[in-house]
Amino acid sequence: MAKFLVHVHTGPSDPTKATLACLVAATALKEGHEVSIFMAGDGVHLLAPETVSALEGQGTGALRDHLAAIREGGGTLYLSGMSAKARGYDESLLEGHPATFAMPDELVRLAAEADTVLCY
């Protein structure tokens, strides 16, 4: 199977695009692919509890459902530590998610190792 990197830089201000990214990642996992998700910029807001519980895209489903499928499917989440810090988040943002903070060098490594990179 293939290795996917889904780079999410869209935040909750565009719920359809943001949830589509997570829907595609969850779908790839369900089909047996290896998936890493790197959230940067406003994409880091997607793990905030109030966003997880409320965000729903038009025709792309609920964020909470997609994140649950990613967690259950063995997906790995990376969050830009610089983006999170700039937006006032700390380690508590990672709680309940298979996530870790990462720097740009990790994004570059993931992109170089992926068969397919999708950006939302």
Image: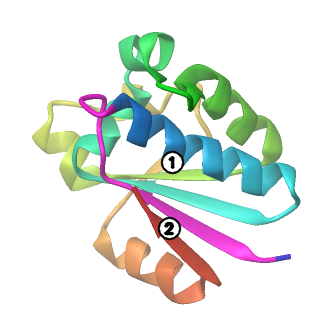
Q: Is residue 113 above or below residue 36?
A: below
Which residue is at the far front? 59
Q: Are marks 2 and 1 in contact (CB under 8 Å)?
A: yes
Region in magenta? 2-14
In the image, what residue occupies the spot 28% across and 32% down? 90
Quadrant where the image shows the C terminus: bottom left
Residue density around tag 1, few if under 14, some if 14–19, many if 20 or more, within 10 Å: many
Q: Position of residue 15 (x, y in %)?
A: 37, 29
Report whether residue 99 is seen. no
Measure how far apart labels 2 and 1 are at the Cα level.
8 Å
In the image, what residue occupies the spot 86% across and 76% down? 1
Q: Is residue 19 above or below residue 24?
A: above
In the image, what residue occupies the spot 30% across and 29% down? 12
Was residue 13 drawn as part of the magenta stretch in this picture? yes
Quarter of the rendering containing residue 11: top left
Q: Is residue 21 left or right of residue 32?
A: left
Residue 116 image label: none
Residue 118 image label: 2
Three-letter amino acid code at the position of disc 1? Ala
Residue density around tag 2, few if under 14, some if 14–19, many if 20 or more, within 10 Å: some
State the scheme by which the image is colored.
Answer: rainbow
Q: Position of residue 20 (x, y in %)?
A: 52, 42
Three-letter amino acid code at the position of disc 2? Leu
Q: Is residue 8 above or below residue 54?
A: below
Q: Which is more toward the observer, 91 or 105?
A: 105
In the image, what residue occupies the spot 70% across and 45% down? 26
The residue that label 1 is drawn on is 21
Quarter of the rendering containing residue 23: top right
